[in-house]
């Protein structure tokens, strides 16, 4: 039988994760004496890593689990791919469960992962309720959250700085002279709350009063159907901040169908940074999250916990950047998302 990474770990008296660190030169430093034991075991056993076979192997227990809220949403699909590529780099197959924005279904996937004895779990929780938080806190394997937090900052979580990113996007609309800016928010999860907080902060800093925030599910249809409500009344807004790119795409189509010109009749800025935001007409100005970096860091944090056999903790916030296109009123220069090629392009051009 072929020698496996687990065989090397047993011979060296260490964990399989540390063997991966030596083979992949990171992401964590391995003590010199431990590294020498692992290299000696590799030599003694004649181990030859096969990256493809290792990444596809579905042996019981040698896998990570990932729960996402909606597999049809391109933002979550890109985040999941970033996690998968990082897990693959360290030799872990990734099991993915689509919670479909349902807490009960999410818990079902979590139990299924634990029954399969996955080594660790990554999660974008469908809700940030205390009940769900308590369930995650009870599971015996290491857990790392990404994109959404449970607000107390204790559980290991990697997120974008949504408050500051939203504040920058709305301040940009204010800079175009808009004083009546409405907000279309997503459901009541931490990401929506933080983006609304940034919207309100930008208006407060400009001495402006915000309009009532409209909450809808994430998604293009929700954005399309929300436009009439947002523009109702005798004094409608001249600009909109939308807390997700996907909803903003639906809203742009609704504006076109109603004969509104963006940005002349209605300026729009959004939040996320999915690739499709670059291909609308006009292009969508958006607060871009470092999607690939978030997924990579979360996966590395989990793999690191498996190697050290200690539970990670705390909240990591990564900065966003405002990618300016034509929907806000700036010249509509084509600007690709820096996440379009999974973080392998810099995307530093600005409109």
Image (cartoon, rainbow, N blue to C red):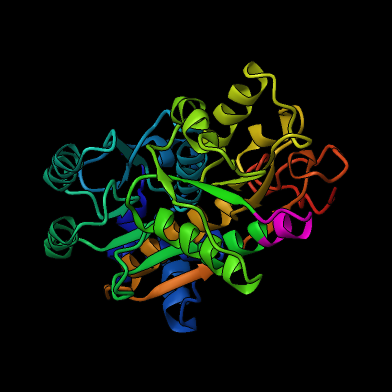
Counting from the top left corner in percent of width and height, residue 75 is at 51, 40
> Which segment is the magenta one?
171-179
In the rendered image of this protein, does residue 41 appear above or below residue 246?
A: below
Horizontal side of residue 140 vs 320, given as left or right: left
Depth check: give the residue in front, 159 or 51. 159
Depth check: give the residue in front, 180 or 202. 180
Residue visible at 77% across and 31% down in the picture: 282
Q: Is residue 300 visible?
A: no
Residue visible at 52% across and 43% down in the picture: 244
Counting from the top left corner in percent of width and height, residue 10 is at 27, 63
Horizontal side of residue 105 vs 241, given as left or right: left
What is the quadrant of the N terminus in the image?
Answer: top left
Residue 132 is covered by the magenta coloring: no
Depth check: give the residue in front, 142 or 109. 109
Question: Given the current orientation, which residue lies at the most extreme top position?
Answer: 257
In the rendered image of this protein, does residue 201 appear above or below residue 262?
A: below
User: Quarter of the image holding residue 313?
Assistant: bottom left
Residue visible at 42% across and 28% down in the picture: 72
Horizontal side of residue 36 vs 125, given as left or right: right
């Amino acid at each position: 039988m072929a020698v496996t990474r687990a065989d090397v770990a047993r011979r060296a008296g260490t964990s399989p994760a540390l063997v991966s660190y030596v083979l992949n030169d990171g992401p964590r430093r391995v003590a010199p004496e431990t590294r020498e034991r692992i290299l000696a075991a590799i030599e003694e056993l004649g181990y030859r890593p096969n990256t493809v076979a290792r990444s596809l192997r579905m042996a019981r227990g040698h896998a990570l689990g990932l729960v996402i809220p909606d597999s049809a949403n391109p933002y979550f699909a890109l985040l999941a791919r970033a996690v998968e590529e990082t897990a693959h780099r360290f030799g872990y197959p990734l099991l993915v469960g689509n919670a479909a924005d349902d807490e009960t279904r999410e818990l079902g996937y979590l139990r299924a992962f634990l029954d399969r004895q996955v080594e660790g779990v990554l999660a974008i929780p469908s809700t940030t309720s205390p009940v769900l938080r308590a369930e995650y806190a009870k599971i015996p394997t290491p857990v790392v959250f990404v994109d959404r937090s449970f607000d107390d900052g204790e559980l290991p979580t990697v997120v974008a700085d949504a408050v500051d990113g939203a504040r920058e996007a709305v301040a940009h609309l204010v800079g175009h002279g808009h004083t009546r800016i409405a907000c279309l928010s997503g459901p009541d999860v931490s990401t929506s709350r933080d983006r609304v907080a940034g919207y309100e902060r930008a208006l407060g800093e400009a001495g402006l009063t915000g309009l009532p925030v409209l909450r809808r599910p994430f998604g293009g249809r929700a954005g399309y159907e929300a436009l009439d409500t947002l523009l109702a009344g005798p004094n409608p807004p001249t600009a909109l901040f939308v807390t997700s790119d996907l909803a903003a795409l639906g809203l742009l189509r609704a504006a076109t169908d109603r004969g509104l010109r963006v940005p002349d009749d209605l300026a729009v800025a959004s939040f996320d940074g999915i690739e499709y935001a670059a291909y609308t007409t006009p292009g969508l100005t958006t607060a871009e999250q470092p999607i690939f970096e978030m997924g990579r860091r979360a996966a590395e944090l989990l793999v690191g916990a498996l190697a050290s056999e200690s539970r990670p903790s705390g909240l990591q916030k990564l900065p966003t950047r405002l990618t300016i296109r034509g929907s806000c009123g700036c010249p509509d220069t084509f600007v690709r998302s820096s996440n379009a090629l999974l973080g392998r392009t810099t995307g530093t051009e600005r409109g």
